[in-house]
């Protein structure tokens, strides 16, 4: 197996984000099907939203049917037995070279799905990078923040509430259950200051520090995605009774 060597250890985090967005008060929440309410099981999505960007949340309101496809695009990064892996293609290996050239210290692999027309739609996967892990909240879904990283790769986060420090050891997965009520913090919805209701299930796996990236076939790469986190042994952190607004972006 070919390997690419990194000049320094890089922290790798993996996200699988499941979102149900809707407008209206409690009666609308009650009308949602059971599988839209904080579903933590295996992914059942059979369609893929290919938008050309790894945007989150509000883009759900602008879905175009022509962007929904029955087949997944080729992957760039997967974690096989916890090891970051790319294909042998020059394009993928150029991604790793950018991590080296740009002095990257943390890589976030972000995937997920959203509830749309009574079913789940997979989002196009994305890769976010940080020079410093404590800057992860700028690009991580829903402002996930790293407050400390230990030399052994243990990550501490205060997501979604500053007073709740949570430990994620290397190789471990935490599943956050969060709820946001709709609110306006500007003039009105027309001024794009409206936040809809959100049922959020977010799996976060800490793959720890790595100084090597494996090179595998595209077929093997595509066989591993972050939906596997739904099948892992996870620690549930339930914040559904908390009043979360700005904390979830």
Image (cartoon, grey):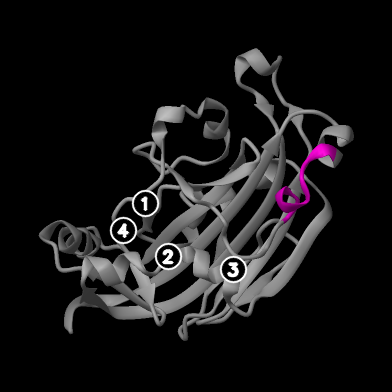
Q: Which quarter of the rendered picture does the C terminus lie within?
A: top right
Q: Mark 1 against mark 3, which lies toward the viewer?
A: 1
Distance between the alpha carbons at the discs numbered 4 and 1: 8 Å
Quarter holding the N terminus is bottom left
Q: Label 4 crowding class (10 Å Cα cut-off): few <14, some 14-19, many 20+? A: many
Residue highlighted by disc 4: 75
Residue lying at 67% horizontally and 71% vertically, measured from the top left: 166
Image marks 1 and 2: residues in contact by CB distance under 8 Å = yes
Secondary structure of the residue carrying numbered label 4: loop
Q: Which mark is residue 230?
A: 3
Report the residue at 51% width, 61% height from top.
15
Question: Alpha-carbon neighbours of circle 1 within 10 Å: few (<14), some, or many (≥20)?
Answer: some
- Give the SS element for disc 1: loop
Give the labeled residue for mark 2.
225
Q: Seen from this angle, which residue lies furthest left?
A: 90
Q: Where is residue 172 shown, x and y percent of the image?
A: 56, 79
Element marked by disc 2: loop
What is the spatial separation of the Cα atoms under label 3 and label 2, in whole angstroms? Answer: 11 Å
């Amino acid at each position: 197996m070919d390997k690419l060597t990194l000049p320094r250890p890089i922290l790798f985090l993996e996200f699988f984000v499941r979102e149900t967005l809707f407008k209206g008060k409690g009666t609308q929440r009650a009308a949602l099907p059971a599988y839209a309410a904080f579903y933590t099981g295996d992914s059942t999505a059979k369609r893929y939203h290919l938008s050309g960007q790894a945007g989150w949340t509000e883009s759900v309101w602008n879905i175009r049917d022509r962007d929904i496809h029955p087949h997944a695009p080729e992957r760039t990064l997967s974690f096989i037995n916890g090891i970051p892996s790319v294909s042998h293609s020059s394009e993928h290996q150029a991604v790793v070279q950018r991590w080296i050239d740009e002095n990257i210290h943390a890589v976030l692999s972000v995937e997920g799905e959203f509830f749309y027309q009574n079913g789940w739609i997979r989002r196009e996967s994305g890769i976010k990078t940080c020079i410093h892990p404590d800057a992860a909240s700028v690009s991580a879904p829903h402002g996930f923040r790293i407050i400390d990283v230990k030399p052994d790769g243990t990550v501490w986060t205060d997501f979604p509430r500053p007073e709740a420090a949570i430990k994620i050891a290397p190789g471990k997965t935490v599943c956050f259950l969060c709820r946001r009520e709709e609110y306006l913090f500007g003039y009105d919805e027309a001024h794009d200051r409206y936040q809809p209701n959100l049922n959020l299930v977010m799996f976060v796996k800490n793959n720890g520090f790595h100084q090597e990236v494996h090179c595998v076939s595209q077929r093997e790469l595509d066989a591993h995605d972050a939906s596997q986190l739904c099948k892992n042994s996870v620690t549930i952190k339930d914040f559904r009774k908390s009043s979360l607004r700005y904390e979830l972006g």
